[in-house]
Amino acid sequence: FFFAMSYAIGFGTDTWVYKNVSDPRYGSLTHQYIYSFYWSTLTLTTIGEVPVPEQDIEYLFVVVDFLVGVLIFATIVGNVGSMITNMNAARADFQSKMDNIKQYLEFRKVGQDLENRVIKWFEYLWTNKQSLDENTVTSTLPDKLKAEIAIHVHLDTLKQVRIFQDCEPGLLVQLVLRLRLQVFSPGDYICRKGDVGKEMYIVKRGKLHVVADDGKTIFVTLCDGSVFG
C-alpha cells in the first residue's frame, strides 16, 4: 500500500514517498519490495521512526496504518492472553481436584503406597490429556454421532486383533459400539491369578507384562492389538 500511495502521489515528490524510481539505486523490484516491507513493518509495529508526512493524504494514510497496527497487536495479545488464561484455568481446576483427592485419602488413612498410586493415576491422565470422561463428553450426542465417534476411535484397534481380521465390516461395527475405554497407570494390575474373567481386554496403546506371583518375573509382554481376558 505504501508503494501504491507513493505511485499515486508521485515518486520522489517529497521525503515521505518512495524515492524516484528513475534512479538506478531505487528502480529495482527487489529494492522496492524490501523498502516497502521495511516501511510497513516500522509503521505497524511503531518500533521505529519513518519519514514525517508532508501532505494531508500522507498524514491520513499513516494514521490509518497506525490504527491497523494497534488493532493487529491488540488482537494478537488478546488471543495469547486468552490461551494462557485457559491453560491456567485448566491447570488450576486439575490442581483443585488433586488437593481434594489428597485430603480425602489422608482423611481415610489409606496408606502412603495407595495414595501415591492414586495420585500418579490422575497425573498420568493429565499428562496424556485423557482427564475427560468419554461417557460425559458423548452423553449429549445422538446415537448416530456416538456410533461414528466410536468407529473412528476404536475400529482400527479392533482390526489389529487377529481373530477379528476376517470378520465382516457389519460385525466389527457392532463390536466397536460395545467397546469401553479404560485407562491404567504404570504399575497397575489389571487382573490377577484366580480372578473370574468377565471381560475381554484389547490393548490399544502401551505395553502389559504377564508376571509371576513374585511380580518381577515376566512371562510375556503384550503390545498394541494384543487380547486377553
Image (spheres, rainbow, N blue to C red):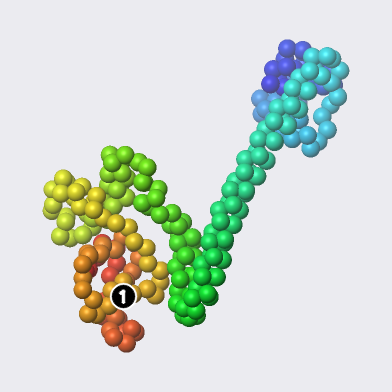
Measured from the top left, where is residue 129 in percent x and y? 46, 56
Instruction: Estimate how packed mark 1 is, as few (under 14), some (14 to 19) or many (20 or more) residues with alpha carbons within 10 Å.
Output: some
Q: Is residue 12 visible?
A: no
* Placement of the N terminus among the 4 image quadrants: top right
Measured from the top left, where is residue 11 in percent x and y? 77, 16
Q: How many marks?
A: 1
Measured from the top left, where is residue 117 in percent x and y? 45, 74
Question: What residue lies at 67% left-to-right and 40% top-to-bottom?
Answer: 77
On the rendered structure, is 154 left or right of 140? left
* Placement of the C terminus among the 4 image quadrants: bottom left
On the rendered structure, is 227 left or right of 186? left
Task: Identify the image quadrant of residue 38.
Answer: top right
Question: What residue lies at 27% left-to-right and 77% top-to-bottom?
Answer: 192
- 28 or 194, nearer to the observer: 194
Q: Is residue 133 visible?
A: yes
- 195 or 4, nearer to the observer: 195
Task: Identify the image quadrant of residue 75.
Answer: top right
Image height check: is 30 above or below 204? above
- 5 or 134, nearer to the observer: 134
Question: What residue lies at 77% left-to-right and 12% top-to-bottom?
Answer: 9
Q: Which residue is mark 1?
A: 209
Question: What residue lies at 66% left-to-right and 39% top-to-bottom?
Answer: 78
Secondary structure type for disc 1: strand
Q: Residue furthest bottom?
A: 214
